[in-house]
């Protein structure tokens, strides 16, 4: 298989992080983190032309955080990433009530980038 990281193509940041109307380059890792956040925060069916894109966790955030609900949140996030982001292999998803505010859910996702085999992760806090 050809080494894709050696191919002459560029990755661009969107939206630009400095707020100016110019294209900024970003790394594969940054691009994947952005795509994962979009996938998790987008409700399935919200995008008309891509109805299978997204997760179905928004309605779970209004329910009491018991162990079965934590399992359901991690399952839905894992499932959404598998559908939305083929560039990563999910290693672990953990969801727990946020320590500072019990109405929020802290999510920790560990993954491996398929192209580079580099392990990475993101942490985010979801709130209803």
Image: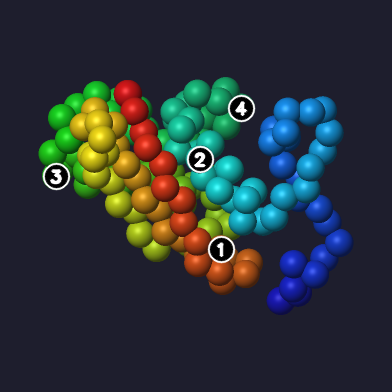
Question: Which x, y percent locates residue 23?
Answer: 82, 38
Q: CA distance from mark 4 to mark 2?
A: 19 Å
Q: Looking at the picture, tell me which residue is in the foreground, 30 or 4.
A: 30
Q: How is the image coloured?
A: rainbow
Residue at horizontal 69%, vertical 36%? 17
Tally of numbered tags: 4
Between circles 4 and 1, the one closer to the viewer is 1
Task: Tell me which label, 4 or 1, sits earlier in the chain.
Answer: 4
Q: Residues within 10 Å of mark 4 (few under 14, many from 20)?
A: few
Task: Tell me which label, 4 or 2, sits earlier in the chain.
Answer: 2
Q: CA distance from mark 3 to mark 4?
A: 35 Å
Residue hosting label 2: 37
User: Decide: marks 3, 4 in contact (CB < 8 A)?
Assistant: no
Q: Residues within 10 Å of mark 1 (few under 14, many from 20)?
A: some
Indicate which disc residue 45 carries.
none
Residue hosting label 3: 67
Q: Is residue 75 left or right of residue 109?
A: left
Residue 79 can be seen, yes or no: no
In the rendered view, would you say 4 is above or below 77?
below
Q: Residues within 10 Å of mark 2 (few under 14, many from 20)?
A: some
Q: CA distance from mark 1 to mark 3?
A: 29 Å
Residue hosting label 4: 49
Dividing the picture into quadrants, the one containing residue 68 is top left
Task: Tell me which label, 1 or 3, sits earlier in the chain.
Answer: 3
Residue hosting label 1: 113
Residue at horizontal 46%, vertical 51%? 122
Q: CA distance from mark 2 to mark 1?
A: 15 Å
């Amino acid at each position: 298989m050809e080494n894709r990281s050696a191919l002459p193509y560029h990755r661009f940041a969107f939206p630009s992080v400095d707020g100016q109307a110019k294209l900024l380059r970003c790394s594969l890792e940054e691009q994947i983190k952005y795509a994962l956040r979009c996938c998790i925060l987008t409700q399935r069916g919200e995008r008309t032309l891509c109805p299978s894109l997204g997760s179905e966790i928004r309605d779970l955030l209004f329910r009491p955080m018991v162990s079965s609900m934590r399992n359901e949140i991690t399952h839905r996030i894992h499932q959404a990433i598998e559908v939305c982001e083929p560039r990563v292999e999910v290693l672990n998803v953990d969801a727990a009530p946020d320590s500072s505010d019990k109405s929020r859910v802290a999510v920790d996702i560990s993954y491996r980038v398929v192209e580079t085999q580099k392990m990475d992760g993101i942490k985010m806090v979801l709130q209803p």
